[in-house]
C-alpha cells in the first residue's frame, strides 16, 4: 500500500505557488483504505495535515493506489474521476486545478 505520509509530503514539496495564485481553498482527501488528509492552499502557501478539516472546499474520495498514481503522473486525475476511481463532492471545479497547483513528479 502507498505510504500516505510520503505521498502528501511530496505533494507539499511540489506545490506551485504561482499556479495557485491568490487561491484560498481546502482539499479534503478521504482515502478509503487509509486515513483522511487535507491540504490547505492559501494565498500562495500550502499546508498539509492528517485528518479531516472542518470546512473543506472540495472532498476527494479515492483509494491510496489511485492517489499515488495520480500524484506520480501515471494516471490522469480527470480520467480517474470520469471512470469513477475518484469521487468529488463540493466545488468540483477546484479539483480541476490540482494538476497545475501540484504538478506530477
Image (cartoon, rainbow, N blue to C red):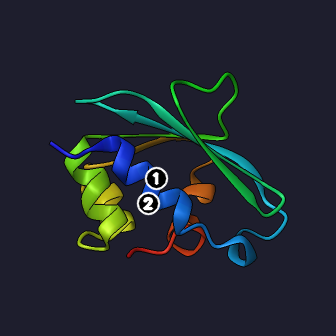
Q: Residue at x 72, y 71 (%)?
A: 17
Q: Position of residue 87 (x, y in %)?
A: 38, 43
Q: For this view, does 10 lie left or right of residue 48?
A: left
Q: Residue at x 38, y 76 (%)?
A: 105
Give the SS element for disc 2.
Answer: helix
Q: For this view, does 60 lie left or right of residue 74?
A: right
Give the SS element for disc 1.
Answer: helix
Q: Position of residue 32 (x, y in %)?
A: 28, 30
Q: For this view, does 59 lie left or right of residue 22?
A: left
| Residue situated in front as seen by the camera: 17 or 80 | 17
Q: Position of residue 94 (x, y in %)?
A: 63, 57
What's the CA distance linking mark 2 and mark 1? 4 Å
The residue that mark 2 highlights is 10
Q: Which mark is residue 67?
A: none
Q: Residue at x 25, y 52 (%)?
A: 66
Q: Which mark is residue 9?
A: 1
Amino acid at each position: 500500500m502507498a505510504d500516505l505520509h510520503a505521498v502528501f509530503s511530496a505533494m507539499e514539496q511540489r506545490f506551485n505557488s504561482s499556479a495557485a495564485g491568490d487561491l484560498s481553498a481546502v482539499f479534503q482527501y478521504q482515502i478509503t483504505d487509509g486515513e483522511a488528509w487535507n491540504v490547505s492552499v492559501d494565498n500562495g502557501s500550502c499546508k498539509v495535515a492528517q485528518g479531516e478539516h472542518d470546512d473543506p472546499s472540495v472532498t476527494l474520495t479515492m483509494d491510496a493506489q489511485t492517489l499515488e498514481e495520480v500524484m506520480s503522473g501515471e494516471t490522469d486525475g480527470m480520467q480517474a474521476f470520469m471512470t469513477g476511481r475518484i469521487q468529488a463532492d463540493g466545488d468540483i471545479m477546484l479539483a480541476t486545478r490540482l494538476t497545475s497547483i501540484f504538478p506530477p513528479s
